[in-house]
Image (spheres, grey):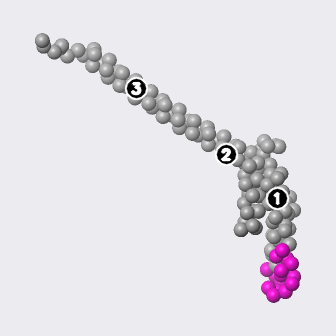
């Protein structure tokens, strides 16, 4: 028995089916990219958005413990390196940074601030 003659309609159907599969793959890929962007935005929102105000919060003013830390460190540089004042200013700077880190860890307005507080406390411990 001879093979059936070439059917141009069947070829077109096969070609159309392949094009549809390619289109479906492209649509899935575009959906995946869109989903990735959506998740990226959600992650940034979760990390940086204030739970109290709904605004993006990275730094807050005034920040007394951090200002004290910077002030004590500057004063420590200005006094004699061999004196008691140098040591006291160093301990006061550490205490101010610990205060800031603990405050951010416990009361930070978003996860970024809490992570920052935890990092500060960890740096003091290590």
Q: Which residue is mark 1?
A: 102
Q: Tell me whether circle 3 and circle 1 mark residues in contact (CB < 8 Å).
A: no
Quarter of the image where the C terminus is located: bottom right
- Magenta range is 77-91
> What residue does disc 2 label?
44
Whether the magenta-drawn stretch holds residue 85 is answered as yes
| Upstream in sequence: badge 3 or badge 1 | 3
* Residue at image coords 82%, 78%: 76
User: Between residues 101 and 53, which one lies in front from this camera angle?
Assistant: 101
Magenta segment, prevailing SS (helix, strand or loop): helix
Disc 2 versus disc 1: nearer the observer: 1
Q: Do the numbered discs 2 and 1 sit on residues whose CB atoms are within 8 Å? A: no
Figure quadrant of residue 55: top right
Residue 105 in magenta stretch? no
Above or below residue 82? Residue 28 is above
Q: Nearer the viewer, mark 3 or mark 1?
A: 1
Task: Report the residue at 77% width, 58% height from top.
Answer: 117
- The residue shown at (44%, 30%) is 25
**Disc 2, SS:** helix
**Label 2 environment density (alpha carbons within 10 Å; few <14, some 14–19, many ≥20):** few
Using the numbered discs, state the Cα–Cα distance from disc 3 to disc 2 in whole angstroms: 35 Å
Q: Secondary structure at mark 1?
A: helix
Provide the residue designation for mark 3: 21
């Amino acid at each position: 028995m001879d093979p059936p003659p070439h059917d141009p309609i069947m070829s077109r159907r096969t070609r159309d089916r392949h094009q549809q599969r390619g289109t479906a793959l492209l649509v899935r890929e575009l959906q995946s990219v869109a989903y990735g962007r959506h998740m990226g935005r959600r992650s940034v929102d979760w990390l940086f958005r204030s739970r109290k105000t709904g605004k993006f919060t990275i730094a807050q003013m005034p920040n007394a413990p951090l200002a004290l830390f910077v002030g004590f460190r500057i004063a420590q540089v200005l006094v004699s390196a061999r004196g008691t004042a140098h040591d006291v200013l160093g301990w006061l700077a550490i205490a101010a940074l610990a205060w800031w880190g603990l405050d951010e860890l416990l009361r930070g307005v978003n996860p970024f601030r809490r992570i920052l507080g935890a990092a500060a406390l960890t740096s003091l411990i290590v």
